[in-house]
Amino acid sequence: MRDVPTFDLSLIFVRGKDGQIRGFFNACRHRGNHLCVENSGNLRAFTCKFHGWSYNLHGELAGVPDEESFFDLNKSQLNLIPVSTDMWQGFIFFNLESEPDQSLEQHLGEFGEALAGYPFHEGSARYQFRGEIKANWKSMVDSFTEIYHVPFLHKCSISDTLAGPENPLGRLLDIRLYGPHKTSSITSNKNYKPWPVQGIAYEFAQSGAVTGGQGTKEGLPPGVNPTKKDDWGLDVNVIFPTFLPVIGPGMYFTHQMWPVAVDRTVWEMTGFVAPARTAADRFIQEYFLVELRDAVLEDMNTVERVQSSINAGVINEFHYQDNEIALRHQNHVVNKCLNT
């Protein structure tokens, strides 16, 4: 089950006995009650807890209690309402249009091809942080796609690991634009000396990597660390408009933004890791996720303050520099969509 805060609706995604993933609106055709309330699980059928109507995994109405008391009930016309659903690299995408203008493959274009083959499926253990942020979704995407802010905002957290003496002003390593999508490659400080506890996590990080210990150059798709440079830290990928898969050496995480108002966004960050095989693996995973959480909280606090200035009418324009090219690109793409 997937709540969609932007549209205040609920969807069901299910793998049928034929192996196909299907999507439906989470609404019984009798009187609209939600069929599913759990986020995940295994069912042989969907049964409404209101009046007991049931549906098979293909969404077909299978059972109606006291069916003979209904007037001219045509069960074949009362199947669950389908949602256009497709998959890319194990991620499920949906489109609320009954007949989308383009397929998912067409929407992703060269971006989808460039990242095809990355072992997303190996990250089967998931950890999620979620909250409602008092900010516009575009400001949140902006904050993740540049590192100009890293030496300053993250001075006491992750600045030295990403910026360092050779990149003190947070310049991008590379950027690739794929139509409305993009990949911003961010540096790492290879001369960084970690704190004692941090050093333990860093030393054994590859033991639980989704990439199985592969390096940052060989064995990975062309869209991951596209320059194949040694000082690569991670790629912030933006699948327009609001889905950000962020790939680093050995693990990846995603940001999903759900706009609910001009100045409010439901944000979900999910970390994907290979299942821990040892206590050391579990320690490493927890350390990285907490380190990531603390850095992102610094971002979230800042975008809320930015939104406050916008709401007050104090700020009505932004000024971008060269290494904020991802922000300029997003502004261009959004304006193009609005003017279409």
Image (cartoon, helix red, strand yellow):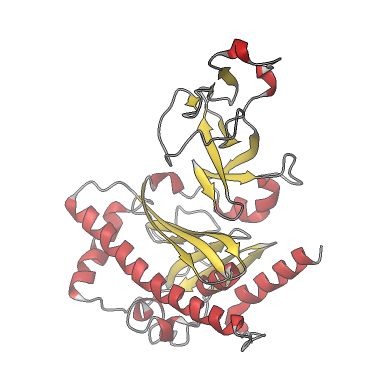
- Quadrant location of the C terminus? bottom right
Find residue 196 and report its horizontal and vertical position in percent: 18, 74
Give me the residue at 63% from left, 84% from top.
320
Numbered circles on residues, count: 0
Asked where in the image residue 289 lies, by quadrant, the reply is: bottom left
Spot the residue most to the right.
Answer: 340
Asked where in the image residue 248 lies, by quadrant, the reply is: bottom left
Asked where in the image residue 317 lies, by quadrant, the reply is: bottom right
Find residue 58 and report its horizontal and vertical position in percent: 58, 25
Compared to residue 212, the image places residue 180 above or below, namely: below
Q: Is residue 147 visible?
A: no
* Closer to the camera in the image, 250 or 44: 44
Compared to residue 291, the image places residue 54 above or below, namely: above
From the viewer's perspective, tell me whether residue 215 is left or right of residue 328.
left
From the viewer's perspective, tell me whether residue 197 is left or right of residue 310.
left
Find residue 282 and report its horizontal and vertical position in percent: 23, 54
From the viewer's perspective, tell me whether residue 280 is left or right of residue 40.
left
Find residue 164 and report its horizontal and vertical position in percent: 38, 83
Give me the residue at 26% from left, 48% from top.
276
Q: Is residue 239 visible?
A: yes
Compared to residue 329, the image places residue 80 above or below, namely: above
Give me the residue at 43% from left, 44% from top.
121
* Closer to the camera in the image, 237 or 22: 22
